Image: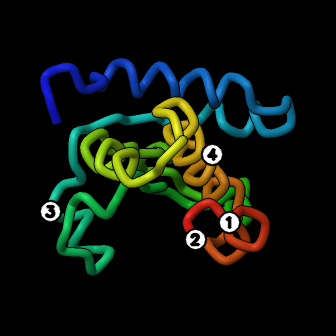
Amino acid sequence: MSDASPTLARIEQIASDTVAALPPAFAAAARDVVLRIEDLPDAAMLADLGMDDPLELTGLYEGVPMTHKSVSYPEPWPDTVWLFRKPILAELETREGVTLEQLVAHVTIHEFAHHFGWSDDDIASIDRWWE
């Protein structure tokens, strides 16, 4: 990756624009989710997922899906969607004809789908992106 690589701020802007464009029913539920953009996932995240290569994780939802929360559910920290710049850029290099904007939007929607209660299998049943 060169110095001309998209910045954290650029990826955050694309992700924020994606969230802002969600349909109203989803946008309201997305407002309470913190969006964090980092270069790479930390070692604890990778260990929790049983992963070794930080370039394999483009995004992560941390929290309790809406479908598992109740009014009395204690929330010690806000739900968070993490996007990881270097893995996204590595993925982009393997995707011919895919723009940075498309990839960041896709990863963002995928992680927010987990917040809305969708599993990876649910997402894969309508989204063949990763095949």
> Would residue 33 be seen by someone viewing this image from the given angle?
no
Graded by Cα atoms within 10 Å as few (under 14), some (14 to 19) or many (20 or more), the crowding at tag 3 reads few
Q: Amino acid at mark 3?
A: Ala
Mark 4 — residue? 109
Say which of marks 1 and 4 sits in front: 1
Quadrant of the drawing holding the C terminus:
bottom right
Graded by Cα atoms within 10 Å as few (under 14), some (14 to 19) or many (20 or more), the crowding at tag 1 reads few
Q: Quadrant of residue 25?
A: top right
Closer to the chain start, of discs 4 and 3, is 3
Asked if disc 4 and disc 3 are in contact, CB closer than 8 Å, the reply is no
Q: How is the image coloured?
A: rainbow
Label 1 vs label 4: CA separation?
A: 14 Å
Mark 3 — residue? 43
Residue 110 on image: x %, y %: 60, 53
Label 2 vs label 1: CA separation?
A: 6 Å
Q: Is residue 114 left or right of residue 103?
A: right
Q: Quadrant of residue 16?
A: top right
Label 2 vs label 4: CA separation?
A: 17 Å
